[in-house]
Image: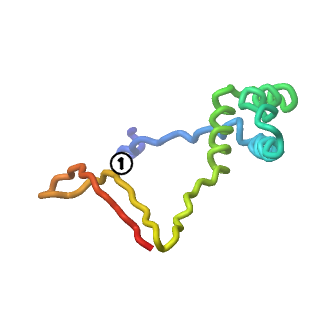
Protein backbone atom coordinates (compact mmCIF):
# COMPACT_ATOMS: atom_id res chain seq x y z
CA UNK A 1 0.00 0.00 0.00
CA UNK A 2 2.92 2.36 0.65
CA UNK A 3 4.00 2.07 -2.99
CA UNK A 4 0.71 3.66 -4.16
CA UNK A 5 -0.13 7.34 -3.78
CA UNK A 6 -3.84 6.40 -3.91
CA UNK A 7 -5.22 3.06 -2.72
CA UNK A 8 -5.51 0.82 -5.79
CA UNK A 9 -8.95 -0.48 -4.85
CA UNK A 10 -10.28 -3.97 -5.28
CA UNK A 11 -8.94 -5.99 -8.19
CA UNK A 12 -10.94 -9.01 -9.20
CA UNK A 13 -8.75 -11.98 -10.07
CA UNK A 14 -9.28 -13.54 -13.49
CA UNK A 15 -11.55 -16.55 -13.43
CA UNK A 16 -10.12 -19.70 -14.92
CA UNK A 17 -11.71 -20.91 -18.14
CA UNK A 18 -14.51 -23.39 -17.38
CA UNK A 19 -13.47 -26.98 -18.05
CA UNK A 20 -16.59 -27.56 -20.11
CA UNK A 21 -15.55 -24.99 -22.76
CA UNK A 22 -13.04 -27.40 -24.29
CA UNK A 23 -15.84 -29.93 -24.90
CA UNK A 24 -18.61 -27.50 -25.84
CA UNK A 25 -18.49 -28.30 -29.57
CA UNK A 26 -18.65 -32.02 -28.89
CA UNK A 27 -21.75 -31.59 -26.72
CA UNK A 28 -23.40 -29.52 -29.46
CA UNK A 29 -22.71 -32.31 -31.98
CA UNK A 30 -24.18 -34.95 -29.65
CA UNK A 31 -27.34 -32.90 -29.15
CA UNK A 32 -27.66 -32.27 -32.91
CA UNK A 33 -27.36 -35.98 -33.67
CA UNK A 34 -30.03 -36.68 -31.05
CA UNK A 35 -32.60 -34.54 -32.89
CA UNK A 36 -33.30 -37.42 -35.32
CA UNK A 37 -33.60 -40.02 -32.57
CA UNK A 38 -36.75 -41.02 -30.68
CA UNK A 39 -37.15 -39.22 -27.34
CA UNK A 40 -36.29 -42.27 -25.25
CA UNK A 41 -32.98 -42.78 -27.06
CA UNK A 42 -31.63 -39.24 -26.73
CA UNK A 43 -28.68 -38.43 -24.47
CA UNK A 44 -29.41 -37.07 -21.03
CA UNK A 45 -26.99 -34.75 -19.26
CA UNK A 46 -25.90 -37.69 -17.11
CA UNK A 47 -25.12 -39.81 -20.18
CA UNK A 48 -23.15 -36.96 -21.75
CA UNK A 49 -21.20 -36.48 -18.51
CA UNK A 50 -20.39 -40.20 -18.37
CA UNK A 51 -19.18 -40.20 -21.99
CA UNK A 52 -17.07 -37.08 -21.37
CA UNK A 53 -15.36 -38.76 -18.42
CA UNK A 54 -14.75 -42.03 -20.29
CA UNK A 55 -13.74 -40.82 -23.75
CA UNK A 56 -12.47 -37.27 -23.24
CA UNK A 57 -10.88 -37.56 -19.75
CA UNK A 58 -13.17 -34.83 -18.44
CA UNK A 59 -12.59 -34.21 -14.73
CA UNK A 60 -15.24 -31.55 -14.24
CA UNK A 61 -18.41 -31.96 -12.25
CA UNK A 62 -21.85 -33.13 -13.34
CA UNK A 63 -23.50 -29.79 -12.53
CA UNK A 64 -21.40 -27.94 -15.11
CA UNK A 65 -22.42 -30.43 -17.81
CA UNK A 66 -26.06 -30.34 -16.73
CA UNK A 67 -26.17 -26.54 -16.94
CA UNK A 68 -24.46 -26.50 -20.36
CA UNK A 69 -26.89 -29.10 -21.76
CA UNK A 70 -29.89 -27.23 -20.35
CA UNK A 71 -28.68 -23.96 -21.91
CA UNK A 72 -28.10 -25.57 -25.31
CA UNK A 73 -31.51 -27.27 -25.27
CA UNK A 74 -33.19 -24.01 -24.30
CA UNK A 75 -31.48 -22.09 -27.11
CA UNK A 76 -32.64 -24.47 -29.84
CA UNK A 77 -36.34 -24.29 -28.92
CA UNK A 78 -38.40 -22.04 -31.15
CA UNK A 79 -41.78 -21.07 -29.83
CA UNK A 80 -44.32 -18.97 -31.66
CA UNK A 81 -48.05 -18.42 -31.83
CA UNK A 82 -49.55 -17.62 -35.22
CA UNK A 83 -51.59 -14.43 -35.01
CA UNK A 84 -53.88 -14.82 -37.97
CA UNK A 85 -57.64 -15.15 -38.09
CA UNK A 86 -60.44 -14.80 -40.61
CA UNK A 87 -62.30 -11.46 -40.97
CA UNK A 88 -65.33 -12.70 -39.04
CA UNK A 89 -63.27 -13.65 -35.95
CA UNK A 90 -61.56 -11.71 -33.20
CA UNK A 91 -58.77 -12.55 -30.81
CA UNK A 92 -58.84 -11.37 -27.24
CA UNK A 93 -56.89 -11.72 -24.06
CA UNK A 94 -56.68 -10.66 -20.44
CA UNK A 95 -53.64 -9.76 -18.42
CA UNK A 96 -52.05 -7.53 -15.80
CA UNK A 97 -49.63 -4.64 -16.22
CA UNK A 98 -47.77 -2.22 -13.96
CA UNK A 99 -49.19 1.28 -14.44
CA UNK A 100 -47.76 4.54 -13.10
CA UNK A 101 -50.46 6.36 -11.08
CA UNK A 102 -49.33 9.44 -9.13
CA UNK A 103 -45.67 8.38 -9.14
CA UNK A 104 -46.62 4.95 -7.81
CA UNK A 105 -46.56 1.68 -9.74
CA UNK A 106 -49.77 -0.29 -9.37
CA UNK A 107 -50.77 -3.61 -10.88
CA UNK A 108 -53.92 -3.21 -13.01
CA UNK A 109 -55.88 -5.72 -15.11
CA UNK A 110 -56.45 -5.11 -18.82
CA UNK A 111 -58.45 -6.53 -21.70
CA UNK A 112 -57.27 -6.56 -25.33
CA UNK A 113 -59.27 -7.38 -28.44
CA UNK A 114 -57.88 -7.61 -31.96
CA UNK A 115 -60.27 -7.35 -34.88
CA UNK A 116 -59.38 -8.27 -38.46
Residue shown at 77%/42% (left/top)? 31
Q: Give the image location of residue 88, x and y in percent.
A: 46, 71
Q: Give the image location of residue 27, x and y in percent.
A: 77, 41
Seen from the viewer's position, the closer of residues 53 and 91 is 91
Quadrant containing the C terminus in the rendered view: bottom left
Say if 78 sits above or below 26 in the image: below
Toward the front, the furthest residue is 88
Q: Image quarter for residue 40?
A: top right
Q: Give the image location of residue 7, x and y in percent.
A: 36, 44
Residue at numbered disc 1? 5
Q: Image quarter for residue 18?
A: top right
Quadrant containing the N terminus in the rendered view: top left
Q: Image quarter for residue 35?
A: top right
Residue shown at 66%/40% (left/top)? 17
- Left or right: where 90 falls relative to 109: right
Seen from the viewer's position, the closer of residues 64 and 41 is 41
Seen from the viewer's position, the closer of residues 65 and 79 is 79
Residue shown at 34%/48% (left/top)? 6
Secondary structure state at the residue bearing disc 1? loop
Residue shown at 56%/62% (left/top)? 82
Q: How crowded is mark 1: few (under 14 residues within 10 Å), some or many (20 or more)?
A: few
Colouring rule applied to residues: rainbow
Q: Give the image location of residue 95, x and y in percent.
A: 34, 52
Amino acid sequence: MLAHSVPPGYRRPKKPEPKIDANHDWIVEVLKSDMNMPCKQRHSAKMIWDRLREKHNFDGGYTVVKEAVAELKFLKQEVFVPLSHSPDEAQMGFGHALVNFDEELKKRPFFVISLA
